[in-house]
Each structure stands twice: as C-alpha cells, then as structure tokens.
Image (cartoon, helix red, strand yellow):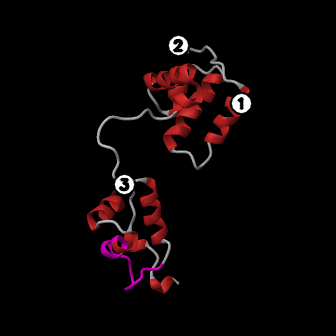
Amino acid sequence: MANGGARIEVHHDDVELLRRLLGAASPDRLRLRVRIVLHAARGVSNREIARRLGLSEPTVGRWVRRFAEAGVNGLWDAPRTGRPRSIDDHAVNNLRRALDRPPPQGDRWSVGSLARTVGLPRTTVRRLCDAYTIDLSGALTKEDT
C-alpha cells in the first residue's frame, strides 16, 4: 500500500488506543509511528508525513504498511536476532531509584557504591551510566537530604 495520499482505514477503537499510546509512558519510536499512522488516517501523503516529521518516505511507508497489515500490533518492534539483553529494564529502574536516595556512605555516589547498592558489577553500572547518560556528579548527596 503506497499511500501516495489515500487515506488508510483506522477503526474507532484503534484511534483511541493510538491516542493513548501518544502518552509519555510510550517509547519515543512508538509515539513517532503512531503519529505517522494518525497522519495517514487523515489522508496525508507519505511524502508530506515524511516532510512534517523529518523522516524518509520509505520509513513512513514501512509503518503505514505495517499498520495496514497488522493493525496497532504492527507498530511494535519485531523481535531481533542476536544476543538478548543481559540487563533488563527492571535493573535500570533500580539504578535510577537508587540515585533518588542519598548514598549509603560518603558524600556522593560512586560507581562502586551504586554497584553495591543495586547488586550489579561495577563495569555494568558504568556501562549503564554511559548508555543512559546518568551523571553521578549530579546525583542526590547526603547534604541534599
């Protein structure tokens, strides 16, 4: 389905679900895909959607097509090949929650104190801090409490 300007059909229940998926709790890439579909549902061409959202036409076409073929479920990432993640979202959330509390010893969080608190290796904590741009120098200190 090329959607050069043809409107795609979106069921009323799907429109409501798509609008809820635009919420802050949804991943950015999912919210972007929802915006693509909502534009296409209003009859906006792939070229115009791509221009408005700063995407390529093939990217817009892919998500319009996936929605047309699989509905809302088609907007989620397909399983990927390769090694599965060794650290899940729960561990990352534990790390972030720990930073909302003062460090157990000393004035500031260090990689070592954070690793001991969340029960992960120091190298893993350092990698997560780098990947999620967590700045330990700006974390809560004992003086802040």
The answer to whether the residues at label 2 and label 3 have Cβ atoms under 8 Å apart is no
**Mark 2 falls on what kind of element?**
loop
Check residue 141 for magenta coloring. Answer: no
Q: x, y percentage for residue 129? A: 35, 62
**Mark 3 falls on what kind of element?**
loop
Labels 3, 1: front one: 3
Residue that appears at 46% across and 57% down: 90
Front-most of residues 98 and 36: 98
Residue that appears at 56% across and 45% down: 26
Label 2 and label 3: CA atoms lie apart by 38 Å
Labels 2, 3: front one: 3
Q: Which residue is mark 2?
A: 1
Label 3 and label 1: CA atoms lie apart by 35 Å
The amino acid at mark 1 is Asp
Q: Is residue 6 left or right of residue 100?
A: right
The amino acid at mark 3 is Ile
Q: Which residue is mark 3?
A: 87
Front-most of residues 81 and 51: 81
Magenta-colored span: 102-115
Query: Circle 3: is it few (<14), some (14-19), or many (20+) Cα within 10 Å?
Result: few
* In the image, residue 92 above or below residue 23: below
Q: Is residue 16 left or right of residue 36?
A: right
Labels 2, 1: front one: 1
Q: Is residue 48 left or right of residue 115?
A: right
* In the image, residue 74 above or below residue 110: above
Instruction: Indicate which disc residue 88 carries.
Output: none
Q: x, y percentage for residue 79? A: 41, 34
Q: Which residue is mark 1?
A: 13
Residue that appears at 29% across and 38% down: 82
Residue that appears at 63% across and 29% down: 38
The answer to whether the residues at label 2 and label 1 have Cβ atoms under 8 Å apart is no
The answer to whether the residues at label 3 and label 1 have Cβ atoms under 8 Å apart is no
